[in-house]
Amino acid sequence: MKLQSFTLIIITIIGLLACNQKPSADTEKKTPPNIIYILTDDMGYGDLSCYGQQTLSTPNIDKLAAQGMLFTQHYAGSSVCGPSRAALLTGKHTGHTSVRGNAPAGQLLKPDEITIAEKMKEAGYHTALFGKWGVGHPPALDDPAQNGFDYAFGYINMWHAHNFYPDFLYKNGEKVMLNNKQTSESYEKFSEEPEGRGVAEVRNDYAPDLFQQDLLSYVENQKDNPFFIYYALNIPHANNEAGYLTGDGMEVPSHGEFASKAWPEPEKGFAAVMQKIDQYVGEIEAKLEALGMAENTIIIFTSDNGPHQEGGHQVDFFDSNGKLRGAKRDLYEGGVRIPMIAKWPGKIKPGIKSEHISAFWDILPTFCDIAGVSTPSGIDGISFMPTLLGETGKQIKHEYLYWEFYEVGGKQAIRKGNWKYVKLHVRDAAEPVAELYDLSKDIGEENNLIEGNEDLALEMEKLLNQAHQPVDFISLFSEDEANAETKF
């Protein structure tokens, strides 16, 4: 009897110890990392000091790069916003996306296209959009919700997003009025554009600040649940309407320390806007640290295309494209090669520069790998998760990258290895022009090597044809069917 009692006591003690023992790393359920994807609007490869900017300083973004991975060969989906964002969200290049340009109307994401947000929801994430949607034309007011976002606050159509002091924004498809008032002056140039575009004469609520405040509140409210944030800032884009009306489209609450510079007013505004972006990144990092979330949050920072030359801002003033040729609306490197920085504490080694060649359509499969869900079939993207983790030997590489652009006479471009093939005037009446560059020796695309490399050019032509899938609303090779040109 005594032996039985003693045995029972021992079993009870062991049971109590087991209950109090912390689960091992193998048995403890892992919390999936939060993902914050910060997409700036029209920021060039040379606009950040960590990418060589000499005049302006971006210390918080530089810190992000120092603590993470800086990509030197990352590419946007297109050289303007609509198709670039479509490529990002769907994992398809512009030869396959349902949105090929900012015009004509009738281009929207299709119901059967699977987006990043939908895959993140499948993985149990709460999904949120802050800022500019602008995918296709004209999107429904609930288009973000139709494409996987649980929460959306900002602009729906891309022209509305030109206006930094709008009369209203949209929250989950419902109009939210702001304390701003637009000028009553009317210009024929703006008459056909969707609602919301314009120039404010009463300026109180600066939209990017509202997005930042709402995002920080969201992070705090969602701290106990995994989330995916798509932070689609509409800066440093210009208010093009203000550029035409006043000559200065770089709207910002204050020029701050740049007010006394002997610079044109739009350049003071551009400098202040870049400072705003850097400030926002610092505030996000500080909020994550304060909430104890920094170690389990991935931050990716990038831009939707190359630098703009709108609203009075000039690309060359701050050397926004660095050593690259071209800018927004070009398929040269300056129009599509963009900064990308990724920080993931404990996973990405700090201070790494990666030369891996990647593009917007790679983000979807990469995020699927991070979230632990399957990658959709029929996409062009390849996950660069191995590169993030330093497992470069496991990284699958693209055979080529492809872009097509319907404005400015029509253009196509291919990057295959270090070779870049650019074809101009594929859509207008001018004779098509083909150019070939070796980016390993000529990052500025100054020396056309088409002569003497006819076999390579022919191979590139075959790839152009292979990559382009026609659509019914516009032709890449004829201006007769639809007008692709946009005013801005």
Image (spheres, rainbow, N blue to C red):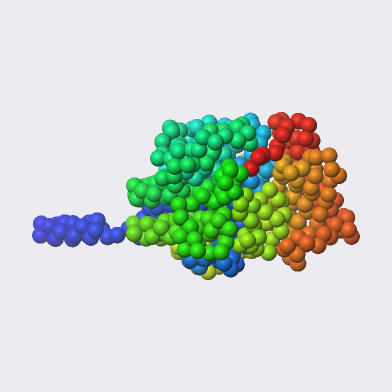
Question: Horizontal placement of 152 versus 474: left or right?
Answer: left
Front residue of this view, candidates 469 and 195:
195
Quadrant where the N terminus sits is: bottom left
Front residue of this view, candidates 36 and 57:
57
Instruction: Estimate the x, y position of residue 434 in percent, counting from the top left.
Output: 83, 51
Q: Which residue: 59% across, 49% down?
A: 247
Question: Horizontal placement of 477 versus 336: left or right?
Answer: right
Instruction: Estimate the x, y position of residue 173 in percent, counting from the top left.
Output: 45, 33
Q: Is residue 52 visible?
A: yes
Instruction: Estimate the x, y position of residue 153 in percent, counting from the top left.
Output: 44, 41
Q: Which residue: 84% across, 43% down?
A: 430
Q: Is residue 357 above or below residue 147?
A: below
Instruction: Estimate the x, y position of residue 261 in percent, counting from the top left.
Output: 53, 64
Q: Which residue: 53% across, 31% down?
A: 140
Quadrant where the C terminus sits is: top right
Q: Is residue 374 visible?
A: no
Q: Quadrant of residue 94?
A: top right
Front residue of this view, candidates 98 and 466:
98
Q: Which residue: 59% across, 66% down?
A: 53
